[in-house]
Amino acid sequence: MIQLAFTFAQNSLNNTMDTYDLAISINPTTPIINDVMEVGQVVAGTIAVANTGLVNAGVYLTADWGPSTGTTDRESTLLANALAVSVFISGATPTQSYIGNLIGLIDQPVIASLITGNSEVVAISVAIPDDRSGPTLLGKAVNTDFVFVAVSVA
């Protein structure tokens, strides 16, 4: 019996690819919170996020934190775990985007769809809860960068 190899080809024609101009800007780029806090105190600041690209954007927020001078990595981790953070999108009816501790503010969606040319104000508040009054956190400090990342959305 003779066997012949059978080959079949299928072409996928007329495929297209496109690139997008995805860009956001923030204002201010300077620190929005620079306070020495006491237990029970709440501090807050706002950052305007603008869609400067050509496509609608979803925006995610991460707190990139680390120890300040004189604070060890372990101590800053304890402090980041203790600090209570709330993130709201300002507006006629503010929308809560995140509530939790600083250590958990990682890749959190804050703006579902930011239309090209529009902006939203992101309000961030930080507090040391009343139940965190022990000596463990006294004199400790963290530096935090709030990092906004945009992804294209329909």
Image (spheres, rainbow, N blue to C red):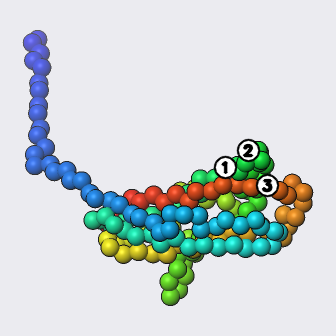
Amino acid at dot 3:
Lys
Q: Secondary structure at mark 1?
A: strand
Q: What mark, if any, has residue 66 been given in the picture?
A: 1
Amino acid at dot 2:
Asp
**Mark 1 in CB contact with mark 2 (< 8 angstroms):** yes
Kindly indicate the quadrant of the structure image that contains residue 62.
Answer: bottom right
Kindly indicate the quadrant of the structure image that contains residue 24.
Answer: bottom left
Report the Cα–Cα distance between label 2 and label 3: 10 Å
Residue 57: x and y in percent read: 37, 65
Query: Which sits earlier in the primary sequence, circle 3 or circle 1?
Result: 1
Return the residue at label 2.
Answer: 73
Return the residue at label 3.
Answer: 140
- Kindly tell me whether residue 63 is visible in this rendering: yes
Residue 122: x and y in percent read: 53, 72
Residue 104 to residue 110: above or below: above
- Kindly tell me whether residue 85 is visible in this rendering: no
Residue 18: x and y in percent read: 21, 53
Amino acid at dot 1:
Gly
Q: Residues within 10 Å of mark 1 (few under 14, many from 20)?
A: some
Is 63 left or right of 14, judged from the image as shown? Answer: right
Is 111 left or right of 44, judged from the image as shown? Answer: left
Q: Secondary structure at mark 3?
A: loop
Q: What mark, if any, has residue 86 been given in the picture?
A: none
Which residue sits at x=56%, y=73%?
46
- Foreground residue among 105 and 40: 40
Query: Which sits earlier in the primary sequence, circle 1 or circle 2?
Result: 1
Kindly indicate the quadrant of the structure image that contains residue 135.
Answer: bottom right
